[in-house]
Amino acid sequence: KSTLGEDWFETFLTFRLNPEAFLDRRKLTKDAFCLDALKDLYSDHIETQCKVHILLLLQEYSSLLITDINVLEQCIESLTNLFKTLGRKTEKRLLKSQVLIAVVTILLTLDLDQDLSSFIQKIKIFLLEIIYSISEDPIVTSSACSCLEELEIFYPGMLHAEIENILLACDQETSAAFQSYVLLLNTCAETLLSMKKTDVAGKESKDMVLNNKSLISTIMSNILELYPLLTHTAQYRVLKNLISVVKNTSQFSPKTFKLYFNGLTLSSEVPLIHLAFDLQETFGSDLLSTQEEKQLLKQLVNLSTPPSLTSSHKLLFLDWLKSFIMHNEKAFSCLSFSDLETLLPSPFDGPLTVEKKAHILALSLPPNSEERASGEFLNEIVNGLVKCSMLSGGTKAAPSLFRTLFIYFSAQTSETISNSIYKLITGMLKTSLHLTPYALSFLDAARTKYNERKFHEKALDHMVEHILSIPLKQFHSNLEYYLAILESASQEPASICRPRAVLRLLQKMLNEGNLNLQNTWCIGNRILSLCRTLMKYHDVQIFYYDLAEVLCLIIQQFQDTDVKDRAKIYYCMLTSLSKLKVQTIFAWNPSEKEGKNTLNSFVTGGESLQFASCIQKLNNPILQMLRLDSEIHSLNTDDNFIEEPISGILELYQQHLTSQESFLQLPFILKHIGTVEENSFAELYGIVISAESEPSCKEISVIEIPILKSAPTPNQEKTVTLQLKPREPQPLTLRFKAEFTCNNGYSYTCSLQSVTLNLDDLFLPLPVSESYLQCSSSWRLFLFHALWERFTNEIKLNEEGSKCCQSVFALKIGTEEFSTFVEKKWKYFIVSKLSSPEYKIAIHLPPQNHLLLKINLVNDKPFVHILVDNISTLPWITLYFQNISEIL
């Protein structure tokens, strides 16, 4: 049975997800699993595919499974013996190749403290024996060559002594495996070249350098003889290495590549074509003449135009062509229009292809050529893009169209090209308004980079005139696009943007009153943006009344709050501030922090005002909140007494609790801590006290105090009341935070000392319904009996969902002190006192819970019978009575 089990593939995936968990689940150590896996490789009944996956596990998780040198030795020996055991059967070549790869991978990736050079040397000899063997399977031989390549890369110079033997084995190899020998020799040449670059001194080192040069020359000569027989991938690697050899040695001349250059340019393989450009960039005129570079350019043009070429290859070739032209002025200076005529867009080209072709044509044709300067030439290039863009869903082609137009606008200064672009853009803005964002982006770029050519002014002037001449219905139907054009034009002089005429057009539209706009917010803000631009770039006195009328109409016609508020702000600025202040506000950069740029200084006209600084945090508190004893109004024993029970008292009480939520009002004294050392804190203004509780309350009021002065007399202390609504009847911890402003103009914040509220701080008398305020004592007594009966019944019946529970507590006080203590402790909550003596006490615990007590003497010992309607409060109540007993 395999280590991976019968369903070995699923087990393999499970192991890869979490190897350590896999081993723990099976109670296997890492060494044991590794050795079991090696045993499975020798088993005949396990299929080859499973063995390959076991080898993959060993090489992928070698650092996890092989933890010491002994396990490594067993693993290497086992795998090499397995290779020999498999023999030379063709059906075993896949497994044998994987064994070689696993051995080398384990050795190269393992990170042990011990020296592994002996293992490396042993495996090198083992692999060399394989590649020297003529009878070995070609696939296994190729795998062995690849493994030796990796060893040579990791340990440069390891195979230099074997180069002659490898050359001999390569000559004797008649199968396709000879390419693996060639690539191995190519790697050896690379390492020889890297060793040659290292600066060394001494006679022996010089002899070694000379020997390396001789070896490199021998290797490359043999490889080049076999070059025509290699695959494209092997040819690329060989020539790529040969470029480095020619650059760094004198044995080979750049002319060596002449034999292969034509083959590279005519190849259909992309890497080989790119290699031709590598040669041209590396050796330049030493390899190619100007005419040959021109031929290379023509060949690249031909490669990038076939209709059958995939889009990705076409774009790649066009990028190469553009880069080649930009870096080789001599090559394309001799080109004529006929050489590049094939780059004109065809029906098979997509938008990106057309854009790249147009860019190449703009770069390659001479600036003063007749073709480049003609408007027909430009129209022919962009004709397809224009047709696609004008369709309702043609926004995919639009970016390429306008980028192409800007390329020609930048590269060509002729009046013919400018007029052609002008006609195209204005025509599209009239007929295809969905292209407005792209056209305005083009005009913004023209304004920024080529302002002196005044192209944008000419186009915007024409569009403003067109908008002012169209019917109001047409203007209203495409309002958003036309407003964007007018906003862009409003940055230009008044002779172009015609502010008064534009504002009167807006007045006419707004006066209709039946806008029926679906996107009111967007349109309203677009109109306001136009007004803002006019106020920013122009003298508002010229169109003062027209602009004020538009802003008033926006306030009246638009229902969106954001639009109304923004219009009111602009109206206030228009009517209250000068032209200079308005323009300065709109031009203000928020990142500037100088006092002269603040809004206050703009309005007041002064520069002395400074920014209000941010709130500074104090590490130590300067204020404190001190608890005051809360006065609870005692039960009025002189109110009207009702002898008969109130019918439906529980329903009335529940309605009262639902309609009026209970809350606590806690009085505090707010005062300075000790004496104030700094005069700046002697008087505090605009004090805001906020509180947080743990556990959190439903609501805690914020305390606001206009002024607090530091004074030693108690009369100057501020009494404040904190109102809070607890979520659960349990003790609370209140944490306070104060924010205030001092007489130095700065604002501060600090944390105050926290305050703990015990359970008895939450005690309240039973709420009284508004209908029975005149007989509150009777109400509370009858309510006590009704609640006591209800809680007791729920406990007896053990109703599902009921939280009622009861308990008993013995007070440690004497008989003489009993009455005095109870009446003092629960003075405001006693609803009945009998001569027994027995006290009935009713306490309301916010938000909607209750604590009912019956306290009497049993065998001259005071006992408290407790009833609660929330079992979670019982531990806190027990703790409350324990604290009372400890005090006594």
Image: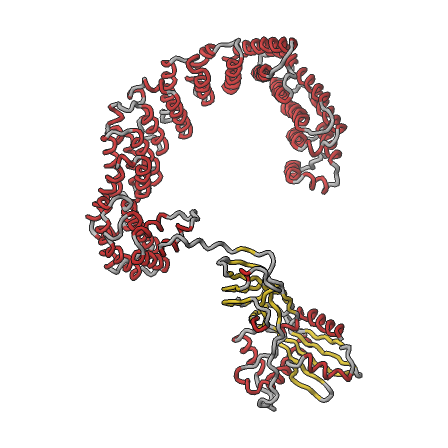
- Count up the numbered dots: 0
Residue 149 position in % (x across, y down):
61, 20
Q: Position of residue 518 (x, y in %)?
A: 32, 56
Which of the 4 image quarters holds residue 19?
top right
Q: Is residue 683 left or right of residue 586?
A: right
The answer to whether residue 180 shows anywhere in this view is no
Depth order, front residue of 373/538? 538
Q: Nearer the viewer, residue 499 or 852?
A: 499
- Seen at 20% across and 51% down, the residue is 471
> Taking 184 as reference, is 265 left or right?
left
Q: Position of residue 352 (x, y in %)?
A: 37, 33
Q: Is residue 700 above or below residue 644?
A: above
Q: According to the image, what is the colour scheme of the structure?
A: secondary structure
Establish if 55 lies above or below 216: below
Question: Where's the C terminus, which quadrant?
Answer: bottom right
Q: Residue at x 64, y 15 (%)?
A: 159
Q: Nearer the viewer, residue 5 or 208?
A: 208
Image quarter of residue 37: top right
Using the image as rendered, state which of residue 229 and residue 554 is in the foreground.
554
Screen quadrant of the N terminus: top right
Above or below residue 196? Residue 775 is below
Q: Where 371 sits versus 601, above or below?
A: above
Q: Residue at x 58, y 8 (%)?
A: 214
Residue extending farthest right: 859
User: Which residue occupies 68% across, 83% down?
Assistant: 840
Specify whether 769 is left or right of 4: left
- In the rendered image, residue 102, in percent from the top left (x then y), is placed at 66, 26
Q: Can the viewer see residue 472 in this picture?
A: yes
